Image: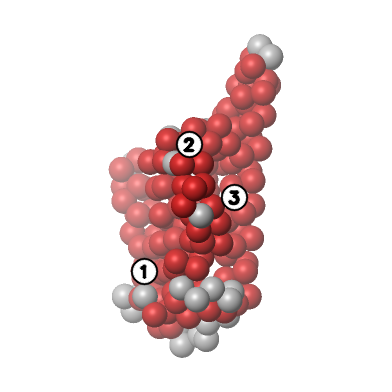
Amino acid sequence: MGFFNKILKTFAYNGWPDLASSLMPSTKYEWLTPFSLSFSSFTVLVQIFFGFDALAFIALLVVMLAELSSGIIASRYRKEPFSSMKLSRFSFKVAYYLVLIFVTNSMANSYMATNQDLASTIFHWLHIFLTVQIVLENIVSILENVAVISGKDKTHWISKIQSKIENFLS
């Protein structure tokens, strides 16, 4: 936990409450608390923007955070210093992933609302494809990091999975 507090300090946050206050400044004012974003509002916004229920969105965030944390641990095992550049690259990657998911979902919904079935179907398919691909890429990265952490070659777990799939298909 101290490591994550150290990361927060590099962004001038004095801890988790300071970050939370920055993300939701209305929580500092008691009279605004009823107007703060509730969980039900969160679920509605996630559904509108990304096309997921809250649990799926939380799972997406968890897999991304697992990639980040396993990557940090793996870099320690490789004796690489922590780099804010790598954290920035990860942040940009997450932002781009979320933009791709948001745009394809929004386009599918927009075309569906105007009864343009072909365009809606194409963007809906693209939304599903990109979401699956993004989650798979994160899982592959986590498996590579876990292999490094456990002292194995980076491709250890991926090779095992490929072998199982090949055996299943043959």
Q: Measuring from the top left, give residue 34's x and y in whole percent.
A: 46, 42
Q: Which residue is mark 2?
A: 41
Please report whichever mark, 1 or 2, sits nearer to the chain's N-terminal start: 2
The answer to which quarter of the image holds residue 92 is bottom right
| SS type, badge 1 | helix
Relative side of 169 to 14, left or right? left
Furthest residue in direction top, as rendered: 115
Please report whichever mark, 2 or 3, sits nearer to the chain's N-terminal start: 2
Foreground residue among 165 and 120:
120
Q: Which residue is mark 1?
A: 146
What's the amino acid at mark 2? Answer: Ser
Residue 128 visible in image? no
- Gap between marks 3 and 1 measured at Cα: 22 Å
Task: Give the residue displayed 46% in from the left and 73% down from the top.
Answer: 15
Q: Report the quarter where the C terminus lies.
A: top left
- Gap between marks 1 and 2 measured at Cα: 36 Å
Q: Relative to 8, say whether 129 is above or below.
A: above
Marks 1, 2: nearer the viewer: 2
Q: Measuring from the top left, give residue 118's x and y in whole percent.
A: 66, 17
Task: Give the residue displayed 44% in from the left and 61% down from the top.
Answer: 65
Please report whichever mark, 3 or 1, sits nearer to the chain's N-terminal start: 3
Determine whether label 1 and label 2 are within 8 Å by CB: no
For residue 97, the mark is 3
